[in-house]
């Protein structure tokens, strides 16, 4: 089935993941004007449009870094649909504004819809993880952050100037607490 093949526009995702300035500049030149135009025609202004673009690019960067994004449709359709949905969600939150939706952008297809749903789920999971992570104590956060970036627990112990045994036990306890809070949250139940 051809629709599950990686799209050539995957280069944009890889460029974001590697923080490639040429790719990011290309995205701003090719795809952002359409988003800005859409938001300005739908109860928004230039600054709000720039905010939406930034939020979506950060989300894509995070998802690409986590290697959980394989593009199966044109980047344009996917990026535009993500920005559009984010903007519509903003309008819903601030529903005291009149909403006029001019939807003459028919570049949506099943692949982009599926990828957008996947990205939105990734964002929700990331937000849940971040919220629960912030509830952890300072020491737990420090141990877990270091274990995410350093190659071994020996390095973490050395960096924190504690024993290897302490770091392993602390990481296990902190991970257990974090997992429990995530699984006990009502948001987790709706994400399942």
Image: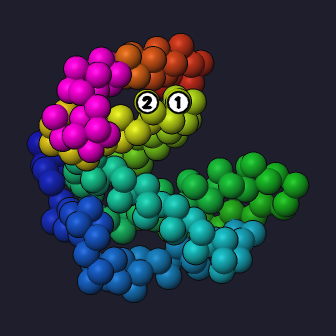
**x and y percent of residue 145 in the render?**
36, 41
- The answer to whether residue 192 shows anywhere in this view is no
Q: Left of 64 or right of it: where is 120?
A: right
Q: How is the image coloured?
A: rainbow
* Rendered residue at 36%/53% (across/down): 62
Quadrant for residue 114, please give it: top left
In the picture of the structure, the residue carrying the numbered disc 1 is 137
Whether 157 is drawn above or below 185: the answer is below
Principal secondary structure, stretch drawn in magenta: helix
| Foreground pick, 134 / 20 | 134
From which residue to which does the magenta span run? 154-172
- The answer to whether residue 75 shows anywhere in this view is yes
Q: Left of 83 or right of it: where is 70?
A: left
Q: Secondary structure at mark 1?
A: loop
| Foreground pick, 105 / 158 | 158
* Rendered residue at 15%/54% (across/down): 6
| Foreground pick, 132 / 104 | 132
Q: Left of 16 or right of it: where is 183?
A: right
Quadrant for residue 57, please give it: bottom left
Question: Mark 2 packing: few (<14 Cα in 10 Å), some, or many (20+)?
Answer: many
Contact check, label 1 and label 2, Cβ < 8 Å: yes
Quadrant for residue 90, please give it: bottom right
Q: Which mark is residue 140?
A: 2
Q: Secondary structure at mark 2?
A: helix
**x and y percent of residue 48 in the render?**
66, 71
Real-space Cα separation, disc 1 to disc 2, in angstroms:
5 Å
Whether 22 is drawn above or below 10: the answer is below
Q: Left of 67 or right of it: where is 76?
A: right
**x and y percent of residue 148 in the render?**
28, 41
**x and y percent of residue 110 in the render?**
35, 47
| Foreground pick, 103 / 149 | 149
* Rendered residue at 28%/54% (across/down): 64
């Amino acid at each position: 089935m051809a629709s599950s093949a990686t799209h050539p526009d995957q280069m944009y995702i890889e460029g974001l993941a590697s923080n490639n300035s040429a790719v990011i500049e290309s995205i701003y030149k090719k795809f952002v004007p359409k988003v800005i135009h859409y938001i300005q025609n739908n109860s928004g202004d230039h600054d709000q449009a720039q905010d939406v673009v930034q939020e979506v690019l950060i989300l894509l960067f995070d998802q690409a870094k986590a290697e959980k994004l394989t593009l199966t449709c044109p980047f344009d359709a996917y990026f535009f649909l993500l920005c559009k949905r984010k903007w519509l969600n903003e309008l819903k939150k601030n529903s005291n504004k009149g909403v006029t939706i001019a939807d003459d952008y028919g570049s949506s297809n099943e692949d982009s819809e599926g990828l957008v749903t996947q990205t939105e789920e990734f964002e929700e999971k990331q937000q849940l993880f971040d919220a629960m992570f912030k509830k952890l104590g300072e020491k737990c956060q420090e141990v877990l952050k270091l274990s995410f970036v350093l190659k071994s627990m020996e390095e973490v112990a050395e960096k924190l100037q504690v024993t290897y045994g302490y770091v392993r036990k602390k990481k296990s306890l902190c991970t257990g607490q974090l997992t429990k809070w995530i699984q006990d949250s009502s948001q987790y139940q709706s994400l399942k």
